[in-house]
Image (cartoon, helix red, strand yellow):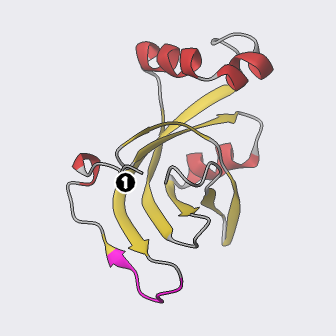
Amino acid sequence: MRADRFPVLATVDGDQARARPASPVRTEGFTVYVASLRRYGKTAEIAAYPGVELCYVSPEHDQVRVTGRAEIVTDRALLDAIWRDQPLLRHYLGRPDNPELIVYRITPTRVRFMREWALEYHEVPAPLDAVPEPTS
């Protein structure tokens, strides 16, 4: 997951799938936090259906797919910590209480891994949040 800075985030828009690069602002195990702007299309899509999937692809074509539920983060201490750690948020949004800023916590319900083009996914066993990321 560390090798792919911009995983693809998939959402549902009515009967149409939507996918776009996302920029995670924090990762804790397989729980991923993604910043967005309220005016973006994914905001309405997630509000209507919070089931999402992130797909990470390494330079060697290994894949990690995190299926989960997105929810808006309201914890002020957590939002302040994310703000402190993310210079791009500060640069583009100016202040942590910018009304356009929205941060989603994607809590995993399923994680799958596939080595390069092996054509077979392997389930990552639960508990998903307790599985440490591999170190390089």
- As drawn, the residue found furthest toward the front would be 136
Name the image quarter holding residue 123.
bottom left
Name the image quarter holding residue 112.
bottom left
In the image, residue 135 sits, relative to residue 117, either above or below, namely above
How packed mark 1 is, by other alpha carbons closer than 10 Å (few <14, some 14-19, many 20 or more), is many
Which residue is at the front of the view, 13 or 76?
76
User: Residue at image x 69%, y 62%?
Assistant: 19
User: Residue at image x 76%, y 12%?
Assistant: 94
User: Residue at image x 56%, y 32%?
Assistant: 103
- As drawn, the residue found furthest toward the bottom would be 119
Q: Where does the image place residue 64, in percent across and percent down from the top left?
A: 46, 65
In the image, residue 91 sits, relative to residue 48, either above or below, namely above
Name the image quarter holding residue 89.
top right
Classify mark 1: helix, strand or loop: strand
- Label tally: 1
Q: Amino acid at mark 1?
A: Pro
Q: Main secondary structure of the magenta part?
A: loop
Q: Where does the image place residue 18, in percent across and percent down from the top left?
A: 70, 64
User: Residue at image x 58%, y 18%?
Assistant: 83
In the image, residue 69 sits, relative to residue 34, either above or below, namely below
Which residue is at the front of the view, 41 or 61?
61
Q: Where does the image place residue 45, in percent across and percent down from the top left?
A: 64, 52
Left or right relative to 132: residue 5? right
Q: Where does the image place residue 26, in percent across and percent down from the top left?
A: 49, 34
Instruction: Inspect the magenta stretch and tell me whether residue 48 lies in it.
Output: no
Q: Which residues are magenta?
A: 117-122
Which residue is at the front of the view, 43 or 5?
5
What residue does disc 1 label?
108
Left or right relative to 109: residue 52? right
